[in-house]
Image (spheres, helix red, strand yellow):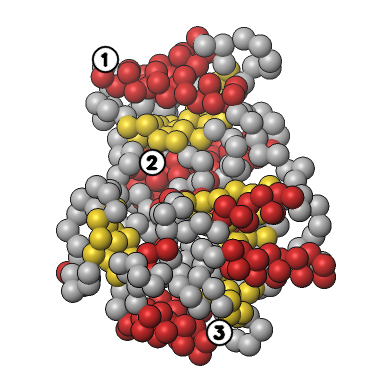
Amino acid sequence: MSGPERTILLVGTFDTKNDELDYVAGIIRGQGGAVLTMDVSVLGDPQAPTDVSKHDVARAADNDIDAVIAAGDENAAMQIMARGAAQLTAQLHQDARIDGVLVMGGTMGTDLALDVCSALPLGVPKYIVSTVSFSSMIPAERLPADIQMILWAGGLYGLNSVCRASLSQAAGAVLGAARAVEPPDRTRPLIGMTSFGKTALRYMVPLKPALEDRGFDVAVFHATGMGGRAFESLAAQGAFACVFDFATQEVGNHLFGSSVTAGECRLTAAGRAGTPQLVAPGCYDLVDLIGWQPVPEALSDLPSHAHNRLLTSVVLDADRRRAVARALCDKLSEADGPTMMLLPTGGCGEWDRPGNDLHDAAGLSVFLDEMRACLPEGKVREVEAHINDQAFADAALAVFDAWLADGTVARP
């Protein structure tokens, strides 16, 4: 193995999963890696001491293990252990003692694992081996931007040939990731941008090279639930010098109960962090739904379009467009940083251009009127163009350049 040895933090309940955790540790060590173990058990004890004991974990949450047991409820107890484990994990990384983390568990362990992984920044390999990986019970807002999950097939109780296949893959994956990862390069300030594929929104095509010419790195996030969640996660960390949040459709998705959601906090993190934000209502008129599920009854009166087998979109009526406008304005009203909403009066998605299938001039007019009514003066700028026109990209760059000139956005 070339380069320094990588150390993986291995977290789990060593009282009940000792054999499985030992198996994973052996795989990592057998591949030339090092392991640091953390026990998050409550009632029982591991077969051998771990590097970080359950007592250490409880103390990190300002408790002791007896108090955790005295909580008398496994949910309350595990949340205490989750706080302690997350605190210690963050400290271990800050002290350069770990290069990645692997957490194992069922629903209880997965709940804790999500907090542990969220304590680590982007670029640190984070793997969860769970009996409920990919389950819809895991909300988008609990998932860090670069988390990896592996289904713990056949792993409910004890080792067997089925679960060894999952565990060995996970061990190799986290160690390989720790060796191969290229952490984000912070030498160029980062701009976060949201969009969809070029068939729907394409402003990123002219904007990305233009911003790069100004000395910025540009990351474009696919705003289909998880992409928006990754965007919000990084915005909350203050990772962006500025955001171009032009695909805000996930706000409407969440408002109308779609499972294609980035969570209730979508369109809030940049504002709370004080990050300058340019915003536009890209594809505001659509709500995306999981394509292989029936359209919810509350939206069944709306026309729909099957984008593919994974994604179906419904087209909002006038009243629902007004509701989206109010939701966008309410979220932006809470922003602490510089905010500008760009309103493209020619349309907000390729499919609503005149002559295209979803064109609805009256619906767009209703939406724009509601936005004008609820956005404060100085926070909105109308652009006499379609969102995919060069004129819209030029207008966005004009605002950005003014912010560069007056120091709102720091120059590279």
The label shown at residue 110 is 2
Q: Please report the residue visible at 26 percent of the width from the left and 15 percent of the height from the top.
A: 161
In front here: 67 or 254?
Answer: 254
Crowdedness of circle 2 by 10 Å Cα count: few (<14), some, many (20+)?
Answer: many
Label 1 SS: helix
Q: In screen coordinates, is 302 left or right of 31? A: left
What amino acid type should be assigned to the residue bearing mark 3?
Answer: Leu
Q: In screen coordinates, is 398 left or right of 226? A: right
Q: Which dot, 3 or 2, sits closer to the camera?
A: 3
Q: Residue 361 in the image: x percent, y percent?
A: 38, 80
The label shown at residue 161 is 1
Up the image or down, 95 lies above or below 47; here it is below
In front here: 13 or 402?
Answer: 402
Q: Please report the residue visible at 57 percent of the width from the left and 16 percent of the height from the top.
A: 33
Q: To which residue does mark 3 refer?
A: 375
Up the image or down, 257 lies above or below 365; here it is above
Up the image or down, 120 lies above or below 31; here it is below
Instruction: First in sequence, mark 1 or 2: give its number.
Output: 2
Crowdedness of circle 1 by 10 Å Cα count: few (<14), some, many (20+)?
Answer: few
